[in-house]
Amino acid sequence: GVTMAKSKFEYVRDFEADDTCLPHCWVVVRLDGRNFHRFAEKHNFAKPNDSRALHLMTKCAQTVMGELEDIVIAYGQSDEYSFVFKRKSNWFKRRASKFMTLVASQFASSYVFYWRDFFEDQPLLYPPGFDGRVVVYPSNQTLKDYLSWRQADCHINNLYNTVFWALIQQSGLTPVQAQERLQGTLAADKNEILFSQFNINYNNEPLMYRKGTVLIWQKVDEVSTKEVKLPAEIEGTKMRVTRTRAKPLPLHCDIIGDAFWKEHPGILE
Ligand code: ATP
Ligand code: ATP
Ligand code: MG
Ligand code: MG
Ligand code: MG
Ligand code: MG
């Protein structure tokens, strides 16, 4: 904007806290839906997994990656999404509050903006909110462990929720009874209940539910029809133009093991 002459009030700027993220570190912003237990109920989310809601979350995350600078990977599950800014990013001088508020507001406005594309018959009843936090990770290993932690959380919750809701929806248990049935059970016990009581092999459940969603930049060929400038006699001719463009595309794969990072070495560059 226009540079203003300094007023005698200018000194108040010195009260702003310095929240510069440590240089050369990975900056992670994680958002989480505010009180989405209630939001899911009020908007009739399918239990345990509403795929419309998950796809809407991913659309919002893609919008964030497209609109903001320097995000190299994002990971989402349930009502949360994590965004990783590249180590050398100098966007807004690495100010944590700028990163966090721009991600959160872009995400929240996108959630409302795109709601109807995913929830055709379900009106949006009130404006949702998202909390945000910034965490700085000093090494590739700590960043990978962060993302592994979120995916492990996705797995643990989804296994639990899958059995919990099968007990309610298929065996007619109340939520309290289902919770009591699952108290103290290990993962193997939950798999066993699913298999013996409901004939569900957990490993055949949709990948998006079990693994969450990873967004990374991938090159895609875009074919468009364009009017091109050519010699006069064929002016106005439309031509198919193919150009390669990077887009944040979703994967539902394991990111805990080494394979993912070996397959995509560019992410941690
Ligand atoms: P940045 O992302 O750095 O904030 P910016 O373009 O938003 O960039 P600001 O210094 O915040 O820059 O200025 C906001 C600008 O938005 C104003 O300069 C003006 O052009 C426009 N603007 C905001 N509110 C109004 C309004 N009510 N009527 C007309 N113009 C407005
Ligand atoms: P807080 O404000 O503390 O985050 P919360 O109610 O959002 O409270 P979370 O731990 O974030 O609590 O859990 C999110 C809840 O939202 C889940 O437990 C689940 O009930 C619901 N939820 C989120 N996404 C989905 C979905 N895709 N399908 C079904 N339910 C969902
Ligand atoms: Mg502005
Ligand atoms: Mg929470
Ligand atoms: Mg939440
Ligand atoms: Mg959550």
Image: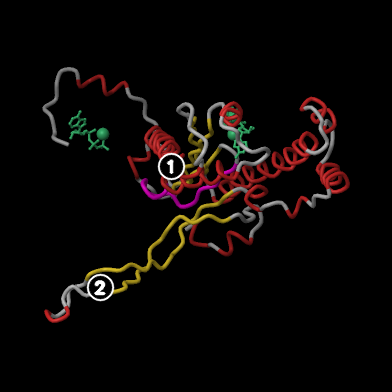
Task: Give the residue displayed 59% in from the left and 26% down from the top.
Answer: 38
- Identify which residue is drawn at 64% across, 38% down: 46
Give residue 252's position: percent from left, percent from top: 60, 54
* Ligand 2 quarter of the rendering: top right
Q: Position of residue 24 (x, y in %)?
A: 44, 47
* Left or right of 136, for residue 179: right
Q: Which residue is mark 2?
A: 238
Viewer-side residue, 224 vs 68: 224
Does ligand 1 reach within 8 Å of label 2's beta carbon? no
Rendered view: 264 above or below 42: below
Find out whether residue 173 is within the magenta segment.
Answer: no
**Position of residue 45 measured from the top left corner of the image (x, y, whole percent):** 60, 36
Residue of label 1: 114
Mark 1 lies on a secondary structure that is helix
| Residue 78 placement: quadrant | top right
User: Of marks 1 and 2, which one's residue comes earlier in the chain?
Assistant: 1
Q: Is residue 216 above or below residue 107?
A: below
Q: Relative to 14, is 245 above or below?
A: below
Q: Is residue 75 magenta?
A: yes
Region in magenta:
65-77
The colour scheme is: secondary structure
From the top left corner, tell me how far across and down residue 247 is, in percent.
43, 58
* CA distance for labels 1 and 2: 32 Å
Check disc 2 and give the amino acid type.
Lys
